[in-house]
Image: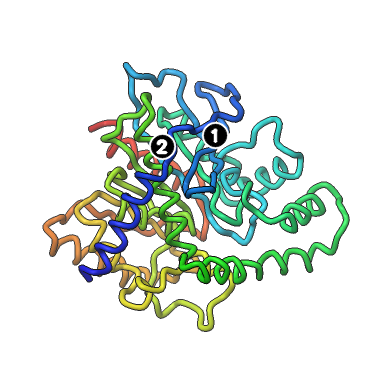
Amino acid sequence: MMTLLIHLVMAVPITLGQAVNPDMKVLETEHRDGYICQMVEYNVEKDERVKAFLLIPDSAGPSDRKAGLVLLHDHGARFDIGKEKLVKPMQSAPENIKLSSEEWVGSGFDGVWYGDELARQGFVVIVPDVLYWGSRSSELCQKWSRARFCGGDGDLKLMKNDVYEGQRAVYDSLYDKGIIWAQKTLREDVAAANILKGLDCVDPENIGAFGWSMGAHRCWLLTAFCKEVKTGVALCWMTLKETCADPMKASDYSMIIPELRDNYDFPDIAQWLAPKSFFFLNGDEDKLFPVPQSRIAFDRMQRIYSEKGAAGKLRTEFFHGTHHCGPAEQKTISDFLKAELQNR
């Protein structure tokens, strides 16, 4: 375990601490209700840049530093949008992206762009695109999106299937270079946390994270292996390995870190999360993460926290509902993050 821990922890913060380039560029700024939304771009690898939304409350500044949040978008087999799953697109965005975002948020968050809502509540928020989503999606994916939402040409079903199966090729192409896709994503998520830490409007001691679905998976990895992130909330992603499909589906490739998957079960992440405060929240009707296995995972995580002298720092709960982030869940999450980051 120690070898793996050193490998992951050393590889992630140190690599990204060096790779984050101070030349972060603001590409576009839009004034919204009580905050600004910026489209930013920054380095994550030697020759690779990532686009993200950065939301800053109007009152935030050097004399009034705010808590920061890294928001991590889901998978959902919807690749034309990434950061737009959590933040309302810019007015300049293509029509298909606006419509796709509106549809996705309507289904998953009951019409609330949760990043915007958290910015209104006083958090500085950053939401990056993962490789193969949003601004980093394929041309075929964008062609599907234009056809789906704006009446463009093409066989929607065939294009969607090809884009979905394309995840295997992404994994393989990275693997051939000695790169694990999910580990690359983790390094990039750490980069986003480092961007927040470097802003003069952010309190560097109060940075947290939130994610739903695949974003939840990213959230507990980020919080476990990034010292800048003090707490997090993972909505709708915790189970046992026995629930995983064999052979893997194409969607699994973006989340698997073989060295972790082969040696540990999912709740073992608590070994690296403790003693940080953290909140796992699953739906009691979520078919992707059945309650019996999730309950066992939660109990195991609580035991690990107790063994590490951190009893009471881990919150594990079920809400009544499906794979979803509705108003009740949003309030529960916001209340937790405020208590951990704003009201200390």
Q: Are marks 2 and 1 in contact (CB under 8 Å)?
A: yes
Residue type at numbered disc 1: Val
Q: Nearer the viewer, residue 21 or 313?
A: 21
What color scheme is it? rainbow
Q: Quadrant of the C terminus?
A: top left
The relative height of residue 305 versus residue 44 in the rendered view (above or below) is below
Apparent side of residue 52 relative to residue 197 in the rendered image (left or right): right
Residue 18 appears at what percent x and percent y?
36, 44
Residue 53 appears at what percent x and percent y?
54, 37
- Residue 147 appearing in the image: yes
The relative height of residue 144 versus residue 61 in the rendered view (above or below) is below
Give the mark nearest the N terminus, 2 or 1: 1
Q: Quadrant of the N terminus?
A: bottom left
Residue 119 appears at what percent x and percent y?
46, 31
Residue 87 appears at what percent x and percent y?
56, 39
Residue type at numbered disc 2: Ile
Disc 2 from disc 1: Cα separation: 11 Å
Residue at 31% over, 45% down:
229
Name the secondary structure under disc 1.
Answer: strand
Please give the label number shown on residue 195.
Answer: 2
The relative height of residue 250 versus residue 40 in the rendered view (above or below) is below
Q: Most extreme residue toward the bottom, as rendered?
A: 246
Residue at 39% over, 70% down:
239
The part of the image, by quadrant, that contains residue 51 is top right
Q: Nearer the viewer, residue 204 or 303?
A: 204
Please give the label number shown on residue 40.
Answer: 1
The part of the image, by quadrant, that contains residue 186 is bottom left
Apparent side of residue 286 relative to residue 339 in the rendered image (left or right): right
